[in-house]
Image (tube, rainbow, N blue to C red):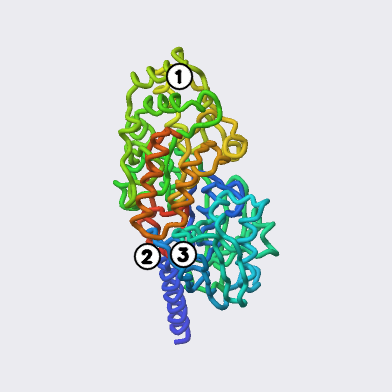
Amino acid sequence: MSSDRTRLAGGTALLVAGLALAQAAFAQRTDIVVGMGLEPPHLDPTTAAAAAIDEVVYANLFEGLTRFAPDGSIQPALAESWDISEDGTVYTFRLHEGVTFHDGSTLDAQDVKFSLDRARSEDSTNAQKGLFAGIEDVTVVDPLTVQITLDQPDGGFLFSMAWGDAVIVAEETADAAKTAPVGTGPFRFENWVQGDRIELVKYPDYWGDPVALDRAVFKFISDSTAAFAAMMAGDVDTFPIFPAPENLAQFEADPRFRVIVGSTEGETILSTNNKQPPFDDPKVRQALAHAIDRQAVIDGAMFGYGTPIGTHFAPHHPAYLDLKATSAHDPDKARALLAEAGYADGFTTTLKLPPPSYARRGGEIIAAQLREVGIETEITNVEWAQWLEQVFRGKDFGLTIVSHTEPMDIGIYANPDYYFQYDNPDFQSLMDALRAEADPEARTALLQQAQTIIAEDFVNGYLFQLAKSGVADARIEGLWENAPTQANDLTGVRWTE
C-alpha cells in the first residue's frame, strides 16, 4: 500500500510540474526586441538632431509637458492641464502630482523651468532651438505650477512642447543624459552595448498607467540582409521601419508576421547647400529639380513605397499643397537652365549619403539622372556620425539625401544657419506671422504660402514622403501604424499570447 501511495504522490508531482511548464509556455511575453537601422549617436534628444535618439527614448524614457498621440493629436503628458490667457501669451501648466525621475527624485516646476531655460539659452545646443525662441519668461508659481510667457501669441506652442527636443530633464542629471539618461517615462535606461543594442527596463514607480512590457531591447542592424535574417529567425520581434522594402511581400505571405504600412512625417529630400556655388544660383537649383524623376527613385530605391512630394510638407496634412508640377521631371529644361546659368558643359559636385537604404539606393539613381543633364556627382557613403559632423554641423557638402522626420518642420527654412543654409527674409517674416496666428484657416493659408515659396525657390530637391513600412510578429499589438513623430512608442504595446 505504501508503494502505491508513493507512486500516486510521484504522479501528482509530475502532473503539477507538467501544468507549470504548460502555463509557462503559454504565459504572455513581457519583453520585446525592436530592430532599428541606425544606432543613435547618444541618448539626449535635447542636444542633437538624430532621429534615432527619439526612436529609442520618446515617450519611453523621456516625457514633455505635452506629447504626440498615435493619430498626431496633442495630448497632456507631464502637464495634467493648462490655461491660456485671453491674449494668448501666457500658458499656465499644472503638473501631475507624484512624478519621479528614474533616480527617485521628484519632478517639480523648477525642473520645467530649468529644461526650457536651458533649451532657449544663448549657448543652447538644442537642434530645434527655434521651438523656444518665443519664450520670454518661465516662472515657477508653486512646485506643481509653471507659467510660461511668450513674446507674442503662438498658435503652435502646445505642438512645439510635444517635440522630443522639449522633454523635461533634471539639472542634476542633464549633463550625463547622452550616456546615462534619467527621465520620467515608464521605462528606465539599463544598458548600452555600443554597436549592438540599448536595453530599457520597466520603471516600477512610474506615475502614469503601467506598461505591459518589463523589458525592451533596441537592436541595431543596418544591413538589410541581416535584418531579414533576424526577423525570420525570431531574433527581432519588430522592425518598425524595415530597411529592405523588397522583402515585405515575403513577410506578408508568412502568417507569423504582420506588415504595417503607414505614413510618416519624413520628407525625403535631395538637400542642397544653398550657399555653396553653383547652388547659390536659383537657376542651378531649378535645373537640379527638373533633372529628377521622383517616381523612378521611389520605384527603384523604395520598391514603390513612398508618396511623391513637391515641397517640404506631408501630403496627409490638411494644409498640404500639391506642387509637384513646379519641379516636374524635364531634362531638356534642366539643360537649358544650366546653360543660362553658365554651366552649359555641366559641373561636378559632392553627394554625401548616410546609411539608410533610401539614401544609398536613391543616391545611385539620382546620380544617374543628374549625369544625363551634365551634373557629375562624387558619391561618398558616410556613417551617421560622419553625416552629422560633416553635413549637418560642418555644412561641408554639395548635395545629400535625408528624410526629415520631425513633425511639420517647415519652419527650419526660416533658419539661415540650418545645414542647407537657405536665407530668405520674406520666408522668415512669414514664419513669424504663422507663430503669432491662432486661427486655423489663417494658419492654413500661411502654411500654403510657405510651401509655395520654398517650392518656387527650389531650395531642395523634393523627392517623396517616407512610408512607414514595418514588420512585426503577428502576436504584437499596440505598435504605431503611422509616425506623427520620430518614435517607437512602446507604452501601449503588448503580446496577445
Placement of the N terminus among the 4 image quadrants? bottom left
37 relative position to 299: left or right: right
User: Marks 2 and 1: in contact by CB < 8 Å?
Assistant: no
Q: At which x and y percent is residue 377?
A: 49, 22
Distance from Cα at disc 1 to Cα at disc 3: 54 Å
* Location of residue 327 in the rendering, given as x and y in whole percent from the top left corner: 35, 31
- In this view, the residue farthest toward the top is 345
User: Which residue lies at the image location 47% right of the left edge and 70% below the top edge?
Assistant: 84
Which kind of residue does numbered mark 2 sit on? Thr
Report which residue position mark 2 lands on. 496
What kind of element bears circle 3?
A: loop
Label 2: few (<14), some (14–19) or many (≥20) C-alpha neighbours in 10 Å: few
> Picture coordinates of residue 47 (x, y %)?
61, 51
Residue at image location 64% in from the left, 53% down from the top: 178
Inspect the image, locate mark 3, and give the three-letter code of the amino acid beneath it: Thr
Pick the quarter of the image with the C terminus: bottom left
Residue position marked by numbered label 3 in the rendering: 491
* Kind of residue at badge 1: Ala
Residue in the foreground of this view, choosing between 269 and 180 = 269
In space, the residues marked 2 and 3 are separated at their CA atoms by: 15 Å
State the CA–CA distance, disc 1 to disc 2: 61 Å
Mark 1 lies on a secondary structure that is loop
Numbered mark located on residue 341 in the image: 1
Going by the image, does 343 lie left or right of 302?
A: right
Residue at x 48%, y 19% (from the top left corner) = 376
N-term-proximal mark, 1 vs 2: 1
Q: Is residue 463 left or right of residue 157?
A: left
Q: Quadrant of residue 475?
A: bottom left
How packed mark 3 is, by other alpha carbons closer than 10 Å (few <14, some 14-19, many 20 or more), is some
Q: Nearer the viewer, mark 1 or mark 2?
A: 1
Circle 2 or circle 3, nearest the eye: 3
